[in-house]
Amino acid sequence: MASASALAQQPVQPLPKVGGCPLGNYSSGGYCVPSASGNTLGAIEKAGSSCPLGFYSSGNYCVKSR
């Protein structure tokens, strides 16, 4: 798996929907799509019960901390 710092530098993009969408995203079909405001932080699917350093838990996702 990629490091948290490498993940944090990835562009914000739609994620496959797993339960509810993370903060700053909305549901569109089978995806969670970043809001158009441009203030959406990057998110990754949660693997296990905790998030990597620099991320916080939001449902089934880990969202990048500011």
Image (cartoon, rainbow, N blue to C red):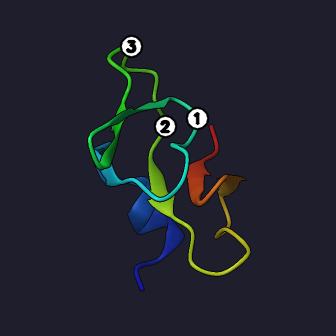
Quadrant of the snapshot with the N terminus: bottom left
- Residue 2 in the image: above or below residue 39: below
Q: Amino acid at mark 2?
A: Leu
- Which residue does the image show at 70% across and 53% down from the upper left? 56
Judging by the rendered image, the residue that carries numbered circle 1 is 23
Mark 1 or 2, closer to the camera: 1
Q: Which residue is mark 3?
A: 37
Tell me where residue 14 sits by quadrant: top left
Mark 3, other Cα within 10 Å: few <14 / some 14–19 / many ≥20: few
Toward the viewer: 24 or 53?
Answer: 24
Q: In the drawing, does residue 38 fall left or right of residue 63?
A: left
Residue 60 image offset from top left, x and y in percent = 60, 60
Where is residue 16 shown, x and y percent of the image?
A: 33, 57
- Of marks 1 and 2, which one's residue comes earlier in the chain? 1
Residue lying at 62% horizontally and 37% vertically, measured from the top left: 66
Which secondary structure, mark 2? loop
Left or right: residue 56 compared with residue 24:
right
Q: Which label's residue is closer to the chain start, 3 or 1?
A: 1
Q: Amino acid at mark 3?
A: Ser
